[in-house]
Amino acid sequence: MSKRKIIILIVAILIVAVIAGIIIYRNSTYSLEEVKKMITSGKETDNMHITIELKTGETTTAVYEQYKKDNLVYSISKDGNSKITGRTLYNKETQDFITILDDKKMITIYKEEPKENKYGPTMATDSFMTVINSHAGADYEYCGKVKVDGKECIKVSLLNKNATDRIEKDYYYINLEDNNVLKDETYIGTDKDNLEKEYESNYTYSFDTVTDEDMLHFDKADFPDYQIFEDRTIGTRHFVRIHHNR
């Protein structure tokens, strides 16, 4: 066989191998156990910013932001018009938990055990694992690979068996690069073949970008018009000391 024919044969074999690899990749499936390992190993650092946008149809109904830096976790809740409705600040070292209800002009300060999600960086991870580990469990389905905001994801669903008066099916889109959930959708109805989407949540992440300016530096003097309820005993909610900053 001539040198030229050998080169052509090698190139043809390589092309076939690449095509076969692409087909295998696109048609590979992920078991429930594999997805559980993925979703509970999402990228999480001591310095990160997560934004969660909740939507009904095309309308944004709420936005939730969380900033983590060192031992502090600062969360901001906004309505669909970007108006701040509430904030929380948690110090993991001192276990001080501060809740600020801006719309009610009320602040509560108390001690609390760690308030972070149990299984991963977002509520979506906790939701997935909680349903799977519940008594009734859920029917799992691998739905294939899709792109979300240009990122390669796998799409999986859980048919929740815990709901008694309706059928509830949740879809999760998991980023293959860092195993974080980029989107989840909830569909409900009385017929599993005719479900309607109730809402969706979209997640964005940034790492090592949070600065001191992003965090809340709490000082009671900055809230003169707020009622402040305070209890420094872990596990209680009596708020025995009340401050009126007026």
Image (cartoon, rainbow, N blue to C red):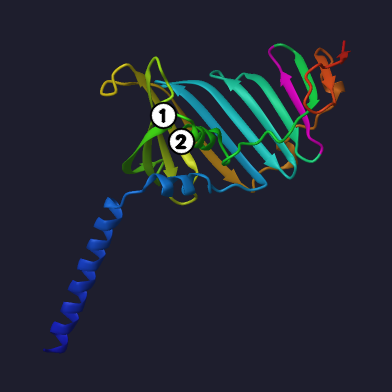
Q: Are marks 1 and 2 in contact (CB under 8 Å)?
A: no
Magenta stretch prevailing secondary structure: strand
Front residue (pair 81, 236): 236
Residue type of the residue flagged with mark 1:
Glu
| Residue 64 horizontal side relative to residue 183, left or right | right
Secondary structure at badge 1 equals strand
Indicate whether 204 appears above or below 11.
Answer: above
What is the CA distance from the residue labelled 1 to the residue labelled 2? 16 Å
Residue 236, image quadrant: top right
Instruction: State the residue at coordinates (73%, 23%).
Output: 99
Instruction: State the residue at coordinates (75%, 32%).
Output: 216
Does 96 lie within the magenta span?
yes
Give, as a single range, the part of the protein colored magenta: 94-103
Does 37 lie within the magenta span?
no
Residue that sits furthest to the bottom in the current view? 2
* Residue 53 marker: none
Instruction: State the residue at coordinates (31%, 21%).
Output: 195
Front residue (pair 20, 161): 161
Q: Which residue is mark 2?
A: 132
Front residue (pair 193, 90): 193
Q: Which residue is mark 1?
A: 185
**Where, quadrant-wise, is the N terminus in this rendering?**
bottom left
Secondary structure at badge 2 equals helix
Residue type of the residue flagged with mark 2:
Ile
| Residue 190 horizontal side relative to residue 37, left or right | left
Instruction: State the residue at coordinates (73%, 21%).
Output: 100
Indicate whether 142 appears above or below 165.
Answer: below
In x, y percent, where is residue 229? Answer: 82, 16
